[in-house]
């Protein structure tokens, strides 16, 4: 082999070695960079999760102030004012997080807890739910399976639900569509006529038609909030209490939904809050 050819082969071999070393070095750098990004992402997610806990304090404070200011719970109250992209900065203003949150009155919804009692399906509640689903143009056939699921849970034969989504595990889109109208609370409660929709009230109080409720709630939503249940009966021109579900003008159960954005991380949470006169408590967080 000539000297020139040997030199050429040596250069090629050297180039191959250099390229191999370069590729190995790049792989190491990329892995380190990827690990750094992953660690930073995990750090941001953890920090966002801790910051989001402050949203629970915000919700409890708002509900307490609302209770002090008003004897009724209505959609124009302090609790109903959402937060959108509230900026929270570090003292040195080097980083900022953005919080969005809202509170819903769960007593303005149909409580699925009434579908079964001590493991027995309650036909009247099932019929009311079927009526609600029909008015919402949803499949009324959902009502009985929901009641069976709750009855099984009460009998210890199935998992205990906490949220509407637990009744529709295979269809989260439908669960989201029904969430403004349905809830699941740990106990039976009166429906708040100051925050409930006409379809919910018509399902729970079939003595009054959907058209009547819509007319009455149109007055309510223009600022004519109900002072008490006697006020409701007077506007409905009824002399006797309605035979359906109990009505109320004040609520104790609320759902807080919050999302916090920190750099590239987003963390969301929901919490069920039970507001009582002496101290509100968080029933569950998810």
Image (cartoon, helix red, strand yellow):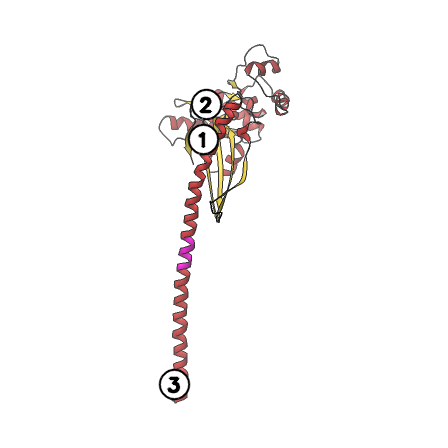
Which type of secondary structure does the marked residue at label 3 adopt? helix
**Mark 1 residue crowding within 10 angstroms, few (<14) / some (14–19) / many (20+):** many
How far from the left and from the top, in percent, is residue 141?
51, 29
| Label 2 secondary element | helix
Q: Which residues are magenta?
A: 32-38
Task: Indicate the position of residue 178 as horizontal and vertical percent values.
Answer: 53, 32
Left or right, 242 with reference to 166: right
Tell me, yes or no, whether the highlighted magenta stretch contains residue 10: no
- Residue 154, how many percent across, how many down? 38, 26
Image height of 92 relative to 119, above or below: below
User: Residue 6, which numbered label?
Assistant: 3
* Residue to which mark 1 is pinned: 272
Q: Position of residue 27 (x, y in %)?
A: 40, 64
* Mark 3 and mark 2: Cα distance apart in space: 90 Å
Examine the image and state in which quarter residue 158 appears: top left
Decide if residue 28 is on the left or right side of residue 62. Answer: left
């Amino acid at each position: 082999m000539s000297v020139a050819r040997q030199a050429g082969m040596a250069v090629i071999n050297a180039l191959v070695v250099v390229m191999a070393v370069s590729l190995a070095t790049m792989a190491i750098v990329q892995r380190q960079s990827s690990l750094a990004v992953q660690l930073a992402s995990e750090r941001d997610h953890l920090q966002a999760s801790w910051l989001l806990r402050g949203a629970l304090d915000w919700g409890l404070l708002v509900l307490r102030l609302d209770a002090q200011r008003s004897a009724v719970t209505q959609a124009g109250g302090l609790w109903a004012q959402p937060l959108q992209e509230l900026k929270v900065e570090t003292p040195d203003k080097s980083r900022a997080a953005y919080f969005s949150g809202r509170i819903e009155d769960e007593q303005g919804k149909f409580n699925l807890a009434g579908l079964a009692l001590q493991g027995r399906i309650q036909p009247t509640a099932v019929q009311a739910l079927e009526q609600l689903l029909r008015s919402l143009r949803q499949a009324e056939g959902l009502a009985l399976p929901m009641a069976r699921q709750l009855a099984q849970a009460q009998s210890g034969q199935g998992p205990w639900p906490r949220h509407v989504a637990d009744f529709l595990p295979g269809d989260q889109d439908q669960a989201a569509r029904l969430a403004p109208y349905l809830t699941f609370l740990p106990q039976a409660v009166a429906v708040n006529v100051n925050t409930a929709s006409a379809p919910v009230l018509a399902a729970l109080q079939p003595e009054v038609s959907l058209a009547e409720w819509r007319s009455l709630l149109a007055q309510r939503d223009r600022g004519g909030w109900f002072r008490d249940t006697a006020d409701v009966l007077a506007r409905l021109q009824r002399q006797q209490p309605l035979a359906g579900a109990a009505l109320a003008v004040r609520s104790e159960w609320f759902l807080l939904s919050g999302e916090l954005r920190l750099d590239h991380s987003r963390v969301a949470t929901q919490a069920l809050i039970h507001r009582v006169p002496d101290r509100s408590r968080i029933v569950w967080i998810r």
